[in-house]
Image: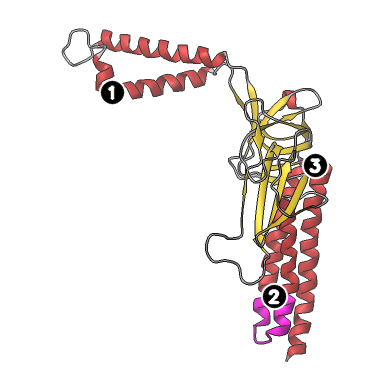
Amino acid sequence: MSILPRFSSVKLPGGHDALAHRYASLAAYPALLYAAWRLPLLPPALLQGSCALFALFYWHWAYRRYRAVADTPTARAASAALGYCELYGTARAHPRAPLASAISGRPCLWFGYRRAWQGPGRRPLTGHADSGATSTESFLLVGKDGGEVVIEPERAEVRARHRHSWMEDGWRITETWIADGDPLYALGEVSAIGGAPTRAERDADFKAALETLKRDPAALARFDADGNRELDLAEWDAAREAVARDVDRRHRELAAIPVSLHLAAPADGRPFIVAAHSPSKASRGYRRLAWLHAASGLATLAVLPLLAGASL
């Protein structure tokens, strides 16, 4: 029995992803030409400046991502270096985080949805609005070498492989998802969680624990052997030894946790991309969008003066 909702739906071919929404920005160039033709009082310099800034912004946005994908070498999942990294493998469900789409109940690893009013008349003012959402639960990228990396998709630009669209009460709802077994490309910051802490981490934790102890009179009183409300040198040494033992105990517990690699959004703002495609396809999509904006912007800048002159 189908788990999908029972309303009118149509299966659409191809994928629907974050990059697809950027292609919609190309509609701005004919809109500018239409404005120049229909509104001759608009200053030509304003239209040309707006066109140049718009084209430059989107060209830079897409070209920066194209270069990030093209210039970052693909690492092996089992031995990925910490830091900014590119990985390619197969999408698999996290064993402790099975996921189903909140919009359809479909089993998946990641999902997103958007809805837009397409019914008769004006869009309702209350209760509904053009909107969307995406999931943030973790899933796995499994490399050909058998290595696993946990993908943390929050804040990622996700290019999904699957799309389903339907109409419901005048709203077009489009659901996208990454399924178990899809090819998976990921570009982001790799970090390690678990394993034995370093000496520097131990020293930092010890210092932080001492500072916490100093701010807790009740905890300090446990080491005041003579009850004079002050810690002498011997009592302070006993407190330090107790803190050190507690820190070492917690670090032994951490060392028993197997090391796992996690890929998430870079702290420095570099592109964070998750795509259910090969690296070459991900690269081509951003390169194509960059040069489409460059060509469309130049063509629009060339035509705008002609329209302005014709409207006089």
Check if residue 238 falls in the magenta segment: no
Indicate whether 246 appears above or below 79: above
Quadrant in which the C terminus is drawn: bottom right
Tell me where residue 307 appears, x and y as whole percent: 76, 83
SS state under label 3: loop
SS state under label 1: loop
Tell me where residue 265 appears, x and y as whole percent: 62, 40
Q: Indicate the colouring scheme.
A: secondary structure
Tell me where residue 159 appears, x and y as whole percent: 73, 46
Pick whichever, 179 or 123, lies toward us.
123
- In this picture, residue 225 sits left or right of residue 153: left
Residue topped by disc 1: 216
Residue topped by disc 2: 48
Q: Report which quarter residue 33 is drawn in.
A: bottom right
Q: Which span of residues is magenta-colored?
A: 32-47
Residue topped by disc 3: 277
The image's mark for residue 131 is none
- In this picture, residue 120 sits left or right of residue 125: right
Q: Residue drawn at (67%, 76%), measured in percent from left and top? A: 47
